[in-house]
Image: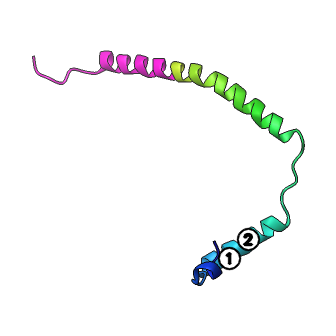
Amino acid sequence: MSADETGEEFTLAERRLAEHLELLRASPPITTPQLVPRVIRGVRWQRAVRDPFLLVGAVAAALLEGLGVLVKPPTGKS
């Protein structure tokens, strides 16, 4: 929906954005045929290692928290 269809005027920022978008439409980026397979490969290996990394992070956080409890000086009077 454009400003003409709604009867409203574009602001300065909206006009500048429309100009930039028009330039992008006029010269779309050139891609190689290998782009999509490369992206899919990257997504697949990242998905495969995500869960083990989360597990290692959780175990490391638990160990550090346990060490913090053991090393923390006593705060109360006995």
Residue located beneath label 2 in the image: 20
Residue at 57 percent across and 22 percent down: it is 51
Does dot 1 land on a helix, a strand or a loop?
Answer: helix
Q: Is residue 20 magenta?
A: no
**In the rendered structure, are the residues bearing label 1 and label 2 in contact, judged by CB atoms less than 8 Å apart?**
yes
Residue 65 position (above or below residue 6): above
Q: Which quadrant of the rendered structure holds the N terminus?
A: bottom right
Inter-mark Cα distance, 1 to 2: 6 Å
Residue 23 position (above or below residue 39): below
Does residue 72 appear left or right of residue 30 in this picture? left
> Mark 2: which amino acid?
His
Residue 38 appears in which quarter of the rendering?
top right
Residue located beneath label 1 in the image: 16
* Residue 68, x across and y down, in percent: 34, 21
* Residue 30, x across and y down, in percent: 88, 53
Residue at 58 percent across and 19 percent down: it is 52
Crowd class of label 1 (few under 14; some 14 to 19; many from 20; radius 10 Å): few
Q: Is residue 75 magenta?
A: yes
* Residue 13, x across and y down, in percent: 61, 76
Residue 29 appears in which quarter of the rendering?
bottom right
Range covered by the magenta-colored residues: 57-78
> Mark 1: which amino acid?
Arg
* Residue 5, x across and y down, in percent: 63, 79
Residue at 36 percent across and 16 percent down: it is 66
Q: Which quadrant of the rendered structure holds the C terminus?
A: top left
